[in-house]
Amino acid sequence: MKTNRSRIKGSLLLAALMAGCLWVGAELRVESSARADSRTKPPPEHFQSGSERSIPILKEISATLKRIDAKLANIERAAREKKP
């Protein structure tokens, strides 16, 4: 009798465990759509053509020349003001 009862208890426990697993599996929702964050990356420099590589350099040279021009203008203005 004891072995029969323990078998029944084991079977009931297994059935309850399986039912619980089925219930949890049914409650879990798996999203079918993928979520991706799109980021735009600049193209690598080694794939750029000659003009694409030279434009940033020319802009930097232009900015440097403008700063030099402004400094020279200030020096010339200061030199004119010092003359008697």
Image (cartoon, grey):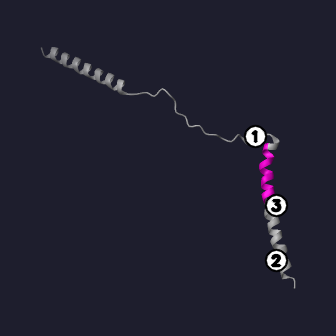
Which numbered disc, 2 or 1, marks the residue that appears first in the sequence? 1
Query: Could you say which is closer to the camera, residue 3 or residue 16?
Result: 16
Q: Which mark is residue 78?
A: 2
Residue extending furthest toward the right: 84
Q: Amino acid at mark 2?
A: Ala
Q: Residue at x 52, y 33 (%)?
A: 35
Asked if 6 appears above or below 29 in the picture, the reply is above
**Residue bounds of the magenta highlight:** 52-63
Q: Position of residue 15 (x, y in %)?
A: 26, 19
Predominant secondary structure, magenta span:
helix
Q: Which residue in the rendered view is the most extreme toward the bottom?
A: 84
User: Which numbered tag is attached to residue 46?
Assistant: 1
- Report how far apart the C-alphas of labels 2 and 3 lie in the structure: 20 Å
Mark 2 vs mark 1, foreground winner is 2
Q: Residue at x 83, y 70 (%)?
A: 73
The local secondary structure at tag 3 comes to helix
Q: Amino acid at mark 3?
A: Leu
Which of 52 and 80 lies nearest the eye of the viewer? 80
Residue 73 magenta-highlighted: no
Q: Earlier in the sequence, mark 2 or mark 3?
A: 3
For numbered disc 1, what is the local secondary structure? helix
Q: In the image, what residue occupies the spot 82% across and 77% down?
A: 78
- In the visual, does 67 lie left or right of 35? right
The residue beneath circle 3 is 65
Spot occupied by residue 66 in the image (x, y as percentages of width and height):
80, 61
Residues under labels 2 and 1: Cα distance? 46 Å
How far is disc 3 from disc 1 in space, using C-alphas?
A: 27 Å
Residue 48 vs 21, above or below: the answer is below
Identify the amino acid type marked 1: His
The C terminus lies in which quarter of the figure? bottom right
